[in-house]
Every structure is written in C-alpha cells, then in structure tokens.
C-alpha cells in the first residue's frame, strides 16, 4: 500500500468521527436524574429539578426515533474517540461512566483503537525508527533505548500528538514504559493512557501471586491523583467493581444511614459520608488506606450513584477473598489476551521434548511423509491476528537490545516480509510467555529485556539444530513449526547438557564439592548445574557488562534469582554450604546459553570431565566417593586443594612411578622418587622424561569406552597434568629432602603428620 492510499484511508476514518451524539446526552440526563433521586432520598422534601437536569431532559426529548437509528448505525461504525481527549464529544464524567459500563459488561476496559488498526498504525508512526526494517529488534529508534527514564518521558511527551501515540501503544507496552521511566515520575504519561492501558497497569503491577497488593494499588492511585481528577476517574472506571470492593473492604466499615453509623462505628475511626448522603464510611485514622478510600468513593459517585452504591453495598456483604478469586480468573483471561499465560501453563514451554524426535518429525513433514503441508506461518501468538507489514501496530518494545542477526534472522530473511512481521510478533509473545514463566512481576521491564533475549537466542539455537545449520531449511521449518516448538528444541538441548552434568556430579557421590571442578571446563559444568543452566561469559562480555554496555544482557541479578523451569529436576546431591555461595558469587559472570557454538563447547567440556572421571575411576577400581574420603583424611586442612586436575595429576604421577595410576596423596618419599627416577634436565628446569610421557599417555588413554570427543579431551587433560608436574616439581633439587609444605596444589600431597 502506498503512502497516498494510507493517507486516504486515514482521512476517511477520521471523517467518520461524530460530534456529541444524542445517546451520550441521554446518558447525561439519566445520571443527573439518578443523582437528584439520591439526594431526595437523603433529604426528602420538595425540590425543583436543577437547571442542568431540566436542560438535559429537554435535549433528550428532542432526539427522534430516526436519530436513534442513525446513532446505532454510527455505533456499529465505531468512531475513534481517544480517552481524555477534549474533542472526543464527552466530558470527563460521561467518559468515565461509559468506561465503567463496558467494564461491568465485559470485565475488559475499552481500547479506543480496538477497531482502528490503520489509525493505530498512523498514531504510532512518529514513534518508530525511519531506517531500514530489521527483523528481531524493536521498532523504536535505537537511541531511545539508551535514554534515561526522564529523557524517555520527555521524548514521548514531545511527540506531535502524544495522546494519540501513547494510547495507540499495546496496553502492556505502555505498562513497561511506566516501569522503565519509574511510576512515581510518570504521572504525565499516565494522564495520556487509555482505560485499557490503565486496567493493564493494575493487572500487571498490582497483583502478587493470586492476591491484590493494596500498597501497589495505592501507589498507582497516588500518581493518578497527582496527574488530575480526570485521570483518577479514568483509572477507577477501568477497574472491576470487585477490585475496588476488595481494596475498600479490607480497611473500611460501611453503614446505610447516619443513625446506624453513629451507633456502630468505632469511636477512634474517621467517619465520612458518601456523596449521596445515604452511605457512611468508617476507616481507622491510623490506616494508610484512608486517603485512597476517600478518593475511590468520591470518584465512584462522580461517575454514577448507582455504581457507588453497588460497590459500597458489596463492601458490606462480600468476602474479599471470594472476590479476589473471581478477579484473579478475569485478570488471567485479560493477561492471556496480551500474551501472558498463567505461570503453570507458561512453564510448559520448558518441558523437555527430545530435539532429535522433533527434528525427525519436522523433516518428515517437509518431505511430505506426514503432517500438514507447509506454507502457513504459525508463530505462537494469541489469536494469530493478521499483521499489515506496511502499517505496524506495535513497537515491539520487548525486543530492545537484542544481540543482532543470527541463524533465526538468516532463515527469516528468506520469508516474505509479511511473514517476517508475524514471526517477529510471535517472538514478542514468546518473550511474554518466558516472562510469565520466570518473573515474579510481569511488568518488570529489566527482566523482560533479558527474558526476551533468552527467548530469541534459545529459539535461534533450536532452529539451527532442527535445520542442521541450513538457513533455507530453517525458513521451511518456520512455515510449519510454531516458534514455541522451536524454542522448546533449543531449551531441550540445554537440558540434555544439564542432565549430563548432573550425572557427572553424581559419579562423585556425597563427596562432591563445588570447588572440585576447576578451570574453564569446571566453570561450564557449574553453570550447567544451576536450576536454569547458564553459560560462563567470556572476558570480553564481562568487560562490556561492567562498562554498562546497553546490549540487553541484564542477567547478573536475574540469573541468580531465576527459579528452576526444569521439569522433575533431580534432587541435588551437593549440600556443602560453599556450593551455593560460590554459585551466587559467580552469577554475575553467567548468562543463559545463546549460540549453538556454546552448546558444542559445553558438550566437549562435559566429555573432557567425563573422560577424566573414567580414568580416575579406573585408578581406584571402583566408585570415587570412597577414595575421596581417604584423600580427605590424608590431606588434613588442605582438602580445599582437591580439584579434578589435581586428582588427575596425582593419578598420572603414580602411573609414572609404578606404571599404573593410583588415587592417593604422594608423600615426601614418593615425590623424591619422582624427581630422581622420572625427571631429567638442567637444575631448575627438570621435566618428565620424553619416553615416559609417551608411554604414560598411551597407557592412560587405552580406554575403549571413550568416544572420539572423550579420547581427545582426555589426551589434552593428561598432557596438561604432565605439564603441571613439570611446573610444580621442575624447580626442586632431587639431592635435597623434599619439604611437602612448599609443594603447590597441582597434585595431592599428604601432610607429614598424616603419613
């Protein structure tokens, strides 16, 4: 579609907007008459109708049947009316009442752009970057993501039509912006929000588990109060009666009539009348909810006496706990529409599914052997709504700070642009699902960035595996496999590594300890043993993170606090206190796995550790756990020196001395024999003899159970162990007694008192 066509469609849409209609005027009359009746009930006596009521009644009577039919047709045409816009044909009270009525009927607050996709795209256009379209990253300008919260707010308020652009945002994106800016400082942005966005702010931020956080709601209400009474009314109108009832009921007592209130209200509580003069509200003067309750009651009666009375009667008779159960169900349905599943359902994406079986099934579908035909892109996204590639209706804020093109982007580039758009939207909803599975607060914008990165890179790893590294096959797979299936394959590859790491740790039994696995391979294994397996970052990444590089990798704290998404995780068999403390200390250097090269490197590291354990098990002719107890007794207070490389070096040392590996600390005599019999060279630079090195390597590597990766890894590890012996012992004089206290930790040396 050309720019001219889009402009013509936008102008036609705007032309359908109506001025103030008779239906709205009739609603005004009804509410004024209702208020007059309420006042008459509170103070019975002859009272003439107010001029406003009389005038509104006359206007209502002036509307004929033909006008009503025209208005019904106009309502079907759904004219665009921004909330809080002085030009929308409604005053603030009318607008709040209309919002409250829709919430009462549907439990969902209205979105002014719900039936106006083109107008939404037009309103969002000033917010989007004007450069070439890129897959997998936010549509907001790159500079926006590095702004401070205050600067982001200033940028949004400076848009040509800030109200139109802000209300055009998907509801959850506005909530994430509020969190990024800081709610306390975002009153001006809150004032521009639509009713649907205000309801989403409560759904995403005010709940903790299945209970309402009254303090969080009071904070949101305080920001709305500072923004103006019309914002308060819109916020209150956008909430279900049950939520307001539950908030008030936990602090207030409600009475019908002053006589009942005077008799039953506690003496030290503040008692005030509702605006209708019929109901009275009592709240403890020490209760911090007193102020918010006053505001809620006044707002309710401003928009509708009927609603105000309905809520106050519910406070008298309804149980807050029962109300919260219903509210929680309604909230869950609204959040599901935004892409946030209930936590248990969201976590199903982390269920293990054999990547090999998934790949085999997809390859059969691509070959036409089984399954549906290809050609329809099916990314995970609620409703799978069509996307107009030329008129984006989202900013994809969740994809800010993504790592840049990867295999997934290469495969997506082979799809039509419209399919890329839908796939990108699918990635956003995938990020929301991960957020729902792992985050305590759905609106945590910092965690969303890292969870979005985790979602995208895990899907990237999964697609690379499923497509066997071929981008054209990856593009075909994206035509038949939902993106959550691709993500599941990537995560399951990591789970396979986690299970291998757990099996390796268990081979050491109860004697295993966090410090045993040293070096780079040990860091990889320790990361894989975490509830959410993590990769130890390279030095360059750590430097970038320390410098505050805004690349979306906010994983240090997030990874340390992430609950386990792994199904049926085996019981931990490391119960040393230092295991958890060392894991927490290392969390700043860890992040989720992101690239298929990391999966390969981790697999090689586990093969290396497994091969070394196999050699050590042969050295003790059985389980390592029993031998570790003997070693601890011999080492005394130097048990902290026990590492996998030290165990291997010790086993190699005994093989050099006696021709067969053993796993027990060396004493002073054994060390001197090693210096005399196995080493030669100049003073200060002695080394294991070359013929012995070759013979020992051949003997130790004769393990038929090892695969190619394990054999290569063990050969390298034995070489490192021999080099460690050279380094540790090469400077000692074989003609002098060996003082074991000055032998380092490269191999296990028994303390003199223990020999």
Image (tube, helix red, strand yellow):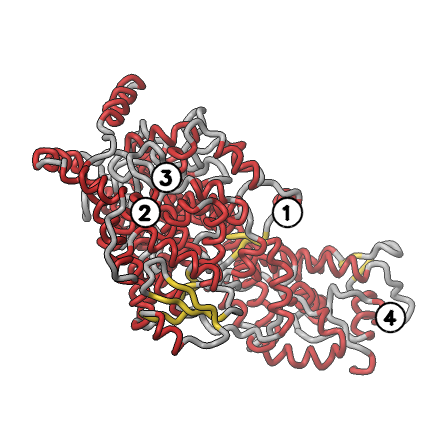
Q: CA distance from mark 3 to mark 4?
A: 87 Å
Which quadrant of the structure image shows residue 617?
A: bottom right
Distance between the alpha carbons at the discs numbered 1 and 2? 51 Å
Identify residue for label 1.
542
**Residues under numbered marks 4 and 2 in contact, where contact means CB atoms less than 8 Å apart:** no
Residue bearing mark 3: 84
From mark 2 to mark 3, how far is it between C-alphas?
9 Å
Q: Residue 241 in the image: x percent, y percent?
A: 31, 60
Of all residues, the one furthest to the front in this rendering is 46
| Relative vertical location of residue 530 with respect to residue 754 in this rendering, above or below | above
- In the figure, is residue 383 to the left or right of 62? right
Q: Nearer the viewer, mark 3 or mark 4?
A: 3
In this picture, residue 64 sits left or right of residue 202: left
Name of the residue lying farthest toward the right: 736
Image quarter hosting the N terminus: top left
Q: To which residue does mark 2 refer?
A: 96
Residue identified by numbered label 4: 738
CA gap, disc 4 and disc 2: 89 Å
For label 2, count other residues whose C-alpha is less than 10 Å away and answer few (under 14), some (14-19) or many (20+): many
Secondary-structure class at tag 4: loop
What number is the disc on residue 418?
A: none
Mark-to-mark CA distance, 1 and 3: 47 Å
Q: Residue at x 24, y 47 (%)?
A: 364
Q: Tag 2 or tag 1, which sits nearer the N-term? A: 2
Asked if the residue at tag 3 contacts the one at tag 2, i.e. Cβ–Cβ closer than 8 Å, the answer is no
Of pointers 1 and 3, the one earlier in the residue sequence: 3
Residues 689 and 167: in front is 167
Q: Dot 4: within a 10 Å radius of its alpha carbon, few (fewer than 14), some, or many (20 or more) residues?
A: some
């Amino acid at each position: 579609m050309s720019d001219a066509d889009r402009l013509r469609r936008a102008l036609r849409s705007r032309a359908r907007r109506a001025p103030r209609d008779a239906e709205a005027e009739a609603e005004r009359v009804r509410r004024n008459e209702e208020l007059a009746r309420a006042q008459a009930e509170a103070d019975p006596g002859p009272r003439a109708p107010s001029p406003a009521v009389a005038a509104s009644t006359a206007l209502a009577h002036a509307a004929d049947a033909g006008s009503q039919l025209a208005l019904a047709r106009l309502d079907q045409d759904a004219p665009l009316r921004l909330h809080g816009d002085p030009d929308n044909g409604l005053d603030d009270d009318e607008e709040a009442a209309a919002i409250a009525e829709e919430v009462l009927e549907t439990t969902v607050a209205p979105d002014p752009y719900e039936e106006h996709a083109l107008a939404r795209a037009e309103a969002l256009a000033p917010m989007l970057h004007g450069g070439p379209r890129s897959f997998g990253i936010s549509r907001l300008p790159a500079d926006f993501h590095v702004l401070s919260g205050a600067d982001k707010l200033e940028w949004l308020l400076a848009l040509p039509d800030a109200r139109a652009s802000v209300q055009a945002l998907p509801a959850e994106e506005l909530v994430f912006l509020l969190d990024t800016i800081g709610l306390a400082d975002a009153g001006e942005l809150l004032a521009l929000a639509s009713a649907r966005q205000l309801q989403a702010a409560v759904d995403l931020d005010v709940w903790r588990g299945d209970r309402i956080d009254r303090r969080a709601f009071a904070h949101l209400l305080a920001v709305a109060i500072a923004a103006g009474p019309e914002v308060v009314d819109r916020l209150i109108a956008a909430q279900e009666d049950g939520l307001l009832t539950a908030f008030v009921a936990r602090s207030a007592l409600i009475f019908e009539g002053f006589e009942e209130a005077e008799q039953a209200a506690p003496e030290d509580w503040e008692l005030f009348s509702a605006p209708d003069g019929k109901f009275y509200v009592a709240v403890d003067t020490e209760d911090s909810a007193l102020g918010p309750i006053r505001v809620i009651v006044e707002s309710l009666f401003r928009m509708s006496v009927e609603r105000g009375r309905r809520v106050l009667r519910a406070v008298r008779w309804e149980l807050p706990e029962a109300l919260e159960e219903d509210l929680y169900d309604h909230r869950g349905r609204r959040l599901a529409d935004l892409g946030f599943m209930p936590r248990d359902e969201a976590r199903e994406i982390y269920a293990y599914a054999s990547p090999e079986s998934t790949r085999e099934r997809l390859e059969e579908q691509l070959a036409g052997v089984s399954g549906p035909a290809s050609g329809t892109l099916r990314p995970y996204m609620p409703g799978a709504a069509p996307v107009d590639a030329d008129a984006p209706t989202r900013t994809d804020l969740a994809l800010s700070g993504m790592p840049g093109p990867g295999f997934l982007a290469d495969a997506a580039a082979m799809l039509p642009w419209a399919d890329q758009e839908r796939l990108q939207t699918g990635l956003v909803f995938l990020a929301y699902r991960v957020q729902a599975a792992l985050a305590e607060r759905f609106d945590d914008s910092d965690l969303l960035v890292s969870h979005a990165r985790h979602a995208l890179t895990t899907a990237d790893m999964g697609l690379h595996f499923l497509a066997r590294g071929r981008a054209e096959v990856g593009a075909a797979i994206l035509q038949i496999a939902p993106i959550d299936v691709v993500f599941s394959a990537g995560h399951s590859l990591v789970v396979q590594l986690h299970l291998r790491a757990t099996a390796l740790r268990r081979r050491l039994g109860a004697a295993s300890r966090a410090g045993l696995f040293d070096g780079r391979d040990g860091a990889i294994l320790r990361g894989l043993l975490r509830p959410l397996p993590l990769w130890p970052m390279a030095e360059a990444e750590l430097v970038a993170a320390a410098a505050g590089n805004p690349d979306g990798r906010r994983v240090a704290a997030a990874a340390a606090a992430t609950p386990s998404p792994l199904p049926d995780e085996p019981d931990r068999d490391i119960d040393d206190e230092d295991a958890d403390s060392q894991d927490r200390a290392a969390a700043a250097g860890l992040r989720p796995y992101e690239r298929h090269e990391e999966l390969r490197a981790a697999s090689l590291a586990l093969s290396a550790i497994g091969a070394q354990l196999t050699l050590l098990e042969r050295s003790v002719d059985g389980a390592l756990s029993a031998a570790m107890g003997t070693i601890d007794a011999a080492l005394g207070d130097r048990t902290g020196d026990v590492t996998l490389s030290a165990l291997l070096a010790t086993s190699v040392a005994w093989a050099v001395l006696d021709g067969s590996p053993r796993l027990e600390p060396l004493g002073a005599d054994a060390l001197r024999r090693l210096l005399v019999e196995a080493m030669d060279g100049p003073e200060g630079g002695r080394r294991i003899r070359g013929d012995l090195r070759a013979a020992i390597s051949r003997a130790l590597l004769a393990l038929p159970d090892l695969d190619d990766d394990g054999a290569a890894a063990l050969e390298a590890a034995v070489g490192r162990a021999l080099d460690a012996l050279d380094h540790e012992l090469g400077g000692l004089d074989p003609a002098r007694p060996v003082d074991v206290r000055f032998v380092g930790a490269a191999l296990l040396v028994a303390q003199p008192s223990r020999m």
